[in-house]
Image: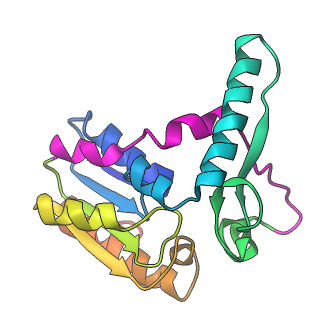
Amino acid sequence: MGFWGTSFGGGHVLKIGSEFKEVVAIISQVPHLSGLSSLHMNSLPKILALTLHGLYDGLRAAIGLKPHYVLSSAEPDHLALMNAPNQSQGYLGMVSEGMTLDQRVAARFGLFVGLYSPVSALRKLTVPVLMQVGINDVITPAAPAYKAASRYPNVDLKKYDSGHFEPYFEPLFSTVAGDQMAFLANHLGTSGKSGE
């Protein structure tokens, strides 16, 4: 079994993979690895604002009220968990025309994201891990991946001249996906071709 995850899920697959004996290879694309490193990408006013929203949402939950939401992503001048320019060219560009996407998340989530550092799961992982990072990523910083690759010989680090969202689109998508298929062919014994 191979695990694949991207962004926050790119960290999850490390954590979950460290608990599954059946997993033989993991792909971690533009992963959230270190909550502390991610916090350092944000300004103090933003961190304080998200904390206040999170505490308010937590209080509402404690007394049985509906969640209080913040945006999951937005342009840099709006409060959101993730901020990057040109959001329409980010993951929102993957939303089919005519579909609507609820971009809100319960604010209490912001209280925990800075404490979540799945890179620590690499201490228990011995299976091959393909870690793909954007060197200009302002959402999930690449530095923890550089450190992990230098510390753990089972980590195969691939760096791309990109931000967080470019791997989802051409022209970079084919390169990123090609590296993933080569990795899977090497470690799962599959060419990635249909019917094989």
**Image coloring type:** rainbow
Nearer the observer, 86 or 110: 110
What percent of the width, then of the height, locates residue 110?
60, 40
Q: Which stretch did the figure color magenta?
A: 97-125
Residue in the image at 71% along x and 77% along y: 86
Most distant residue in the right direction: 98
90 versus 35 height, above or below:
below
What percent of the width, then of the height, locates residue 142?
37, 68
Q: Is residue 19 left or right of residue 113?
A: left
Residue in the image at 77% along x and 20% along y: 60
Most distant residue in the front direction: 44
Most distant residue in the top direction: 63
Does residue 35 appear in this view? yes
182 versus 45 height, above or below:
below
Residue in the image at 41% along x and 64% along y: 29
What percent of the width, then of the height, locates residue 56?
74, 28
Q: Is residue 31 left or right of residue 107?
A: left
Q: Quadrant of residue 145?
A: bottom left
Nearer the observer, 171 or 52: 52
Residue in the image at 30% along x and 75% along y: 158
Q: Quadrant of residue 90?
A: bottom right
59 versus 25 height, above or below:
above
